[in-house]
């Protein structure tokens, strides 16, 4: 039987600036890996900030902001191998950039253009899950299915604190535990589900406590500490790969941006707390760590940032250069072998559109 | 050919398909150790092992959601929902993901999964063991739906569903699971989806049905003096529209029989197709004999709910007199 570890209460940290504790090092991360991690965070941050601008300019539609979630996404993604599968929620819409997906693909998704459809097998990255937590069973099934085939891959599924209230979260977590699926259940606990605070979501002392009920280990990390996220995820990956089943990782942060571009949090959020949290936002914290370690300097930081800005500039250009989607696409892709009615429906539509 | 019941034919199909294709697996509640509450999966666990006939946790949405992930890992899962009405929790996965995922990937990934379940009433069971939920499934884009009425079709349609590259929901008439026997071809046997079955030919009126209502229509045809054609739709999506329209053109009178409640049921869809495409062939209105728009009743009065031979005969009489 699985050994049930007591879920951790204290947040794991590696970056030591928060309360006078010194920086730690993470085993296995050399200078190159540390800088790659920074590059990923800057790319995500740039994607997010530019996307809010593009939304205001009317160049993309409604957009789910992930500012200050970059440490969780990059830290977890870097703990994986390329063959491992990622199941994102809409909050991780751009995590494919860390797997080589061009920004225009994700921007097209937010533009509602079919160029935003990708083949999950190209990146080992599932489609963005819009409804809450319903992708948790998918990730459990994929991880279990890979294990049954004797493959090495494991899977990670991202979801928020609110998702832990969903039935799908429970069914997926339990399925993964029962099948000892190589899965990491990664909860980005930003303490808000649109306007509903965590204390209205659960009476559990911590979300990681839920892991005990499934017979899996639960870890708690500081979600703005990219190295702590990396370390905890890598431990979970090692456990998964060695046949010890799933792990629940609760990464704690604070949502300092609106839920999405359509949301105005002034009605419900504590703005003073937001300003406090912004002071310790995750990209800046990690940059401080790298500078204290003598790995990052002004010139390199500037060049990493300008690379990211350039990638986004090219990305939005490419997304906007996509030709308008043909209405014929309505009838493609839902079936390998579509019903006969699709043909006559399309003929009629073309006749009417053709005027 | 062997003489099998419907549930034996289902079991036969599963044995043949799991043997034929090592990526086919069965997932469901009590399918392994118990062999299914109706014994539809009996023997599979012994033959193919506990991984390919997997006793799942009691979680219908989890079964179907996990099946989506299993497809992504290269499996062809056949999910059993223990009863019709127990499938409702899995509608979330069916609507939000199963019917959409291929489309979402621009057609790049396939989701060749099957959901099969016993359906329908008349079995003197507690509440929510009696429903006819086919409309919820047929209404969902991206999935196919079939309902066999004979042992041979139960085998052939399930085999077609398992081999189909798209998700398919198969409802099996539990009332006739054991009572209806018939000859079933041995070994590999496939009945393609999208083809109706002409049960008997006639000239005066067509009775259209599927699943558990086909035997009711056959019994009504026996009672009636008129020359009655009986058409078993058996594949609701894709639908054999040609067979429906050909029969309507031939007899000019159509009665559609469905066990599910009336409003927005599949009979309404068939009636709409006839109104759109066969209006000049018809000598009278398209009539429906269906369950009522009420919750499926306690079994002491379920016979009054079920479309009966008498109600079908009555409807045909009205139509012939029209």
Image (spheres, rainbow, N blue to C red):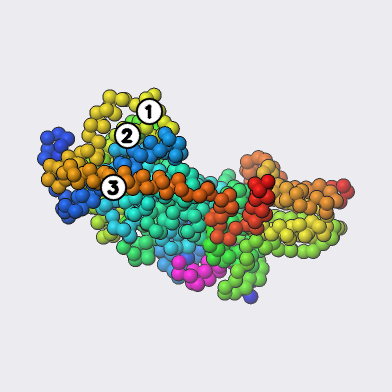
A337 versus B294 height, above or below: below
A90 versus B152 height, above or below: above
Q: CA distance from mark 2 to mark 1?
A: 10 Å
Q: Which part of the image, by quadrant, shows the N terminus of chain A?
A: bottom left
SS of the residue at dot 3? helix
Q: Write down the residue under mark 1.
A: A265
First-in-chain label (2 vs 3): 2
Residue at far right of view? B321
First-in-chain label (3 vs 1): 1
Provide the chain ID for the residue under circle 3.
A
SS of the residue at dot 2? loop
Q: Residue A72: where, in percent of width, then height? A: 28, 44
Provide the chain ID for the residue under circle 2.
A
For image coordinates 73% across by 48% down, the residue present is B272
First-in-chain label (2 vs 1): 2
Viewer-side residue, B42 vs B53: B53
Q: Write down the residue under mark 3.
A: A307
Q: Which residues are magenta?
A: B7-23
Proximity of marks 2 and 1: CB atoms separated by less than 8 Å: yes
| Mark 2 surroundings within 10 Å by alpha-carbon count, few (fewer than 14), some (14 through 19), many (20 or more) | many
Q: Main secondary structure of the magenta part?
A: helix
Q: CA distance from mark 2 to mark 3?
A: 27 Å
Proximity of marks 3 and 1: CB atoms separated by less than 8 Å: no
Q: Is residue A177 left or right of residue B285?
A: left
Q: Is residue B83 visible?
A: no
User: What label sits on residue A255 in the rendered view?
Assistant: 2
């Amino acid at each position: 039987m699985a050994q049930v570890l007591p879920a951790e209460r204290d947040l794991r940290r590696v970056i030591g600036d928060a309360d006078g504790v010194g920086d730690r090092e993470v085993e296995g991360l050399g200078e190159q890996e540390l800088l790659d991690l920074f590059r990923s965070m800057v790319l995500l941050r740039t994607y997010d900030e530019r996307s809010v601008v593009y939304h205001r300019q009317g160049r993309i539609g409604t957009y789910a902001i992930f500012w200050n979630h970059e440490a969780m996404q990059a830290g977890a993604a870097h703990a994986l191998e390329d063959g491992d599968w990622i199941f994102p929620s809409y909050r991780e819409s751009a995590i494919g950039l860390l797997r080589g997906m061009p920004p225009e693909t994700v921007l097209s998704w937010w533009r509602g253009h079919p160029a935003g459809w990708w083949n999950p097998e190209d990146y080992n990255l599932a489609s963005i899950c819009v409804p809450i937590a319903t992708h948790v069973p998918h990730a459990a099934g994929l991880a279990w299915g890979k294990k049954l085939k004797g493959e090495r891959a494991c899977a990670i599924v991202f979801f928020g604190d609110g998702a832990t209230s969903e039935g799908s979260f429970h069914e997926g977590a339990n399925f993964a535990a029962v099948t000892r699926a190589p899965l990491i259940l990664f909860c980005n606990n930003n303490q808000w589900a649109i306007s509903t605070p965590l204390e209205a979501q659960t009476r559990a002392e911590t979300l990681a406590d839920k892991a005990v009920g499934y017979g899996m280990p639960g870890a708690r990390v500081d979600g703005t500490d990219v190295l702590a996220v990396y370390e905890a995820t890598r431990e979970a990956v090692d456990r998964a790969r060695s046949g010890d089943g799933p792990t629940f990782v609760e990464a704690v942060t604070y949502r300092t941006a609106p839920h999405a571009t359509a949301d105005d949090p002034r009605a419900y959020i504590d703005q003073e707390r937001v300003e406090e949290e912004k002071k310790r936002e995750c990209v800046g914290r990690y940059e401080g760590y790298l500078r204290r370690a003598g790995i990052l300097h002004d010139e390199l930081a500037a060049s990493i940032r300008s690379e990211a800005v350039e990638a986004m500039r090219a990305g939005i250009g490419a997304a906007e250069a996509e030709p308008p989607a043909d209405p014929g696409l309505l009838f493609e892709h839902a079936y390998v072998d579509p019903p006969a009615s699709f043909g006559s429906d399309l003929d009629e539509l073309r006749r009417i559109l053709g005027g | 050919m062997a003489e099998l019941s419907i549930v034996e034919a289902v079991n036969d199909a599963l044995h043949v398909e799991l043997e034929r294709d090592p990526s086919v697996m069965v997932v469901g509640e009590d399918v392994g150790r118990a062999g299914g509450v109706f014994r539809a999966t009996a023997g599979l666990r012994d033959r193919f092992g506990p991984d390919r006939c997997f006793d799942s946790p009691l979680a219908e949405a989890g079964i179907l959601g996990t099946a989506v992930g299993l497809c992504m890992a290269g499996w062809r899962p056949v999910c059993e929902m223990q009863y019709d009405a127990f499938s409702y929790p899995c509608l979330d996965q069916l609507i939000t993901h199963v019917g959409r995922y291929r489309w979402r990937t621009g057609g790049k990934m396939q989701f060749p999964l099957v959901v099969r379940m016993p359906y329908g009433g008349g079995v003197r069971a507690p509440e929510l063991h009696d429903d006819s939920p086919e409309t919820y499934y047929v209404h969902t884009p991206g999935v196919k739906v079939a309902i066999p009425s004979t042992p041979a079709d139960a085998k052939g349609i399930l085999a077609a569903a398992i081999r189909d590259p798209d998700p398919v929901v198969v409802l099996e008439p539990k009332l006739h699971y054991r009572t209806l026997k018939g000859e079933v071809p041995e070994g590999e046997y496939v009945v393609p989806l999208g083809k109706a079955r002409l049960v008997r030919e006639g000239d005066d009126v067509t009775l259209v049905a599927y699943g558990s209502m086909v035997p009711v229509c056959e019994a009504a045809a026996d009672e009636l003096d008129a020359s009655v054609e009986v058409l078993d739709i058996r594949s609701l999506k894709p639908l054999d529209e040609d067979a429906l329209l050909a029969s309507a053109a031939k007899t000019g009178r159509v009665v559609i029989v469905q066990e599910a409640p009336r409003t927005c049921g599949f009979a309404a869809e068939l009636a709409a197709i006839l109104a759109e495409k066969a209006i000049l062939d018809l000598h009278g209105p398209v009539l429906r004999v269906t369950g009522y728009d009420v919750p499926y009743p306690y079994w002491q009065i379920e016979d009054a709910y079920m479309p009966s031979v008498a109600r079908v005969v009555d409807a045909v009489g009205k139509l012939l007199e029209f």
